[in-house]
Amino acid sequence: MNRTRMNVRACWPGLLLVIVSLMASLAWGEEMESLRGAKPLDAGDLPPQVHRFEEGERFSRNYVQQPPLVPHEVERYQIDTRANRCLSCHSWANHRRELAPKVSRTHFQDRDGNDQSNISSRYYFCNQCHVPQADAKPLIDNLFQPLQTLRAE
Amino acid sequence: MSKDQRDKDTTPKRGPRRWWAALRRPSARYSLGGLLAVGLVAGIVLWGGFHTVVEATNTEAFCVSCHEMGDNVYPEYKQTGHYANRTGVRATCSDCHVPDAWGPKMVRKIVASRELWHKALGSIDTPEKFEAKRLELAQRVWDTMERTDSRECRNCHDFESMDYMDQTDRALRRHQQAEEQGDTCISCHKGIAHKLPDMSEVDPSLAPGGLEGEG
């Protein structure tokens, strides 16, 4: 009696292995979904659609605090401690010559609210907030409605 | 000159003096046609050889064979549109930095001997040294291009061949303005094939404010 119970106990790991492998083989029959969708590992995947920037007409803002979008190409613009390509047109010194909008005066403030002589280092990296405009649809459906009071139509 | 010395001059000479004397005398042994033919062939070979060597010093491989170029400016250039772009046309080092016309090209090649001198001195043999001199070096190229009215740019980019209607609004406006005012390419198009140097001295409005007295 005692002996047979011992034998059953010894069998437990083997039983578990059989059950798990049975479940796994059942799951294998179904479509396996990974981050790249239900595609076999050796099949190619289409590259994601690239949303081209739109040059020209400026997009309206959708809410008051929205950083305005950039209506032109900014690829390969150098923005580092040595130089800032954006400011070569948008700085207060250059914007008249280039007929470009000038940087908001709020960008001159450091974190203590003191105005600096030029764009504060915390606003210096323009493309952290300002991105080129593109006709890109929301990735996830949502109920957001842009403010009609801001739209120029 | 005394008579003795003149007599001495007519005696057979040795070494270089003899060769010089032979060069000064008209040939009595070879025909003029033979001499011309040999001269012509030798001229073609020598000129071809010279030209081949000059062109070899115009290749990208030659330019980046010094680590000063290969480690600093070359990797930056590889990120730009003059290295790789939509149409597959590439402008390599010499297309922008060496004039096309023979005279200016020779002048540039002779001036380049200065670069050999500074290679020997090790003026920019570390990234730190290069960074410290970047503005000075860039300024020198900008000045040259201002002086030559961006001659090397215009080998490819010419106002005459620009289709303004194919350009974006802001490019169109600025290019027409530049053409009317006689502006040159480099006055606006700086840092297009290499990273810009520290521009705070050139245009202080490009630098972050509030960092004065920090670095």
Image (tube, rainbow, N blue to C red):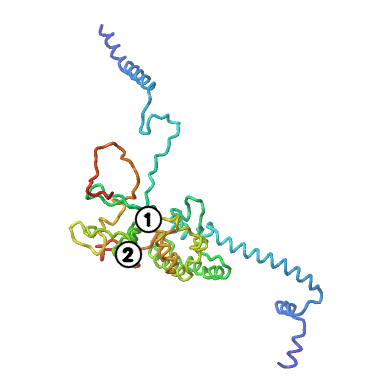
What kind of element bears circle 2?
loop
Q: Circle 2 is placed at which residue position? A: A94
What kind of element bears circle 1?
loop
Q: Disc 1 is attached to a residue of which chain?
A: A
Q: Is residue B158 left or right of residue A23?
A: right
Which part of the image, by quadrant, shows the N terminus of chain A? top left
Classed neighbour count for the residue bearing mark 1: other residues with Cα under 10 Å, few (<14), some (14–19), many (≥20):
some
Classed neighbour count for the residue bearing mark 2: other residues with Cα under 10 Å, few (<14), some (14–19), many (≥20):
some
Give me the residue at 37% from left, 55% from top: A77
x and y, in percent, of residue A97 in the image: 34, 65
Q: Is residue A133 left or right of residue B29?
A: left
Q: Circle 1 is placed at which residue position? A: A77
x and y, in percent, of residue A148 in the image: 23, 46
Residue B44 vs residue B81, the one in the foreground: B81
Dividing the picture into quadrants, the one containing residue A20 is top left
Select label 1 or label 2 by which is in front: 2
Query: Which amino acid, mark 2?
Result: Asn
Q: Disc 2 is attached to a residue of which chain?
A: A
Mark nearer the N terminus (1 vs 2): 1
* C-alpha distance separating marks 1 and 2: 17 Å
Dividing the picture into quadrants, the one containing residue A82 is bottom left
